[in-house]
Image (cartoon, rainbow, N blue to C red):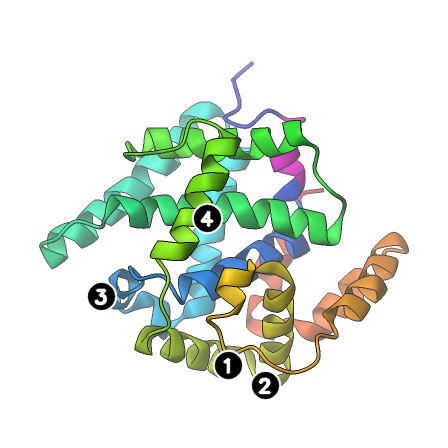
Amino acid sequence: MKESFVPANSIVRKIWGRADTVLFIFAGAAAEFALNKAVDWLYFTGRLPADPLGRLFSTVAYARQIIFSERGDAMRAIDKITAIHTSVENARGANIPDWAYRDVLFMLIDYSIRSFELLERKLTPSEKDEVFDIFYRVGLRMHLNGLPTGYQEWLAMRENHLDEDLIYSAFTNDLYRQYKKRLGSIRYLILKQVQMQLVPEKVKKQLPFSGIQWVPIFLRIYKLLRKINLEKVFKNILLPVAYKSQIKALDKL
C-alpha cells in the first residue's frame, strides 16, 4: 500500500475536505495577500488581477493534490509549484524573497486553523501541531530557508511577519476592485464580512473594513443548515455560477 503525504485520519484532510472551509481559508488569504509587500510578483505575470477567482482555484487544486495524494504524487506537485516560481523568477531576472515564500506558507497554516475553528470547533494543541507539520514538510520540499521547526516558533515568526511584511498599497486597492468586479456587490460584501471574522487584528486594521459585522448571525444560521444538510442550497444561491462545479468538487467528506 502506497504511503500518503498526509495520513488518512489527519485533521488536515478534515479541514481541507469541505468546500466551505477551503473557501474560508482563501477568503482570509485573499485579504492578507492583498497587503503583502511581495504581491507585485503576481502582478508581474498578470494572472492574479486578470482572474483572481481562477487563480484561487488553481492554488486550491495544487494544495489539495498535495493533501489528498500519495507521497510520490504530492512531491511531484510540490516540485511543479517550485518550477513555476523558478520560471517567473527567470523571466523577471530576480528572486522571490525567502520571506515571501514563508509568508504564503504561514497563511495556509493560520487560515486552515482559523477557518476550521470558525466553522467547526476549536482545535487541540496536538491538532495545531499537525497542521503546522504538514505545511512545514511542504516548505522543506520546496527548499525554503528560515522555516520555524515547531508550532510555537511559528507563532512568534507569524507575529513578526504581520508586523514587517504587510502594507496597504495601490496593489491592495486594485485587488479589492477586481474582487468586487468578479463577485458582484452582494457576494463582495459577504467576502469582506467573512474576512473581518477571519483575519488577525493587524490585518484588519490595514484594510478598508467598516460597518456592522453581521457574519456571526449568518454563521449561526449556516451551521444550523449544515446540520440538516441544507447548506448546499444556500451555497448555490451565493456562489458565482461559473465556478459552481469547481466548488462542488472541493467536497471530499
Q: Which residue appears at 46% of the width and 24% of the height? A: 71
Name the outermost residue toward the bottom: 185
Nearest-to-viewer mark from 1 and 4:
4
> Are the residues flagged by discs 1 and 3 in contact, CB closer than 8 Å?
no
Depth check: give the residue in front, 147 or 179: 147
Q: Quadrant of residue 13?
A: top right
> Are the residues flagged by discs 2 and 4 in contact, CB closer than 8 Å?
no
User: Which of the two discs, 4 and 3, labels the residue nearer the N terminus?
Assistant: 3
Task: Give the residues drawn in magenta, as a range.
Answer: 8-14
The CA span between labels 2 and 4 is: 32 Å
Residue type, label 4: Glu
Depth check: give the residue in front, 51 or 165: 165
Residue type, label 3: Phe
Depth check: give the residue in front, 71 or 179: 179
Q: Which residue appears at 38% of the width and 49% of the height? A: 103
Q: Which mark is residue 180?
A: 1
Identify whether 116 is placed above or below 235: above
Give the labeled residue for mark 3: 44
Secondary structure beneath dot 1 equals helix
Query: Could you say where residue 185 lies in the image, as x and y percent from the top left?
Result: 59, 85
User: Which of the two discs, 3 and 2, labels the residue nearer the N terminus?
Assistant: 3
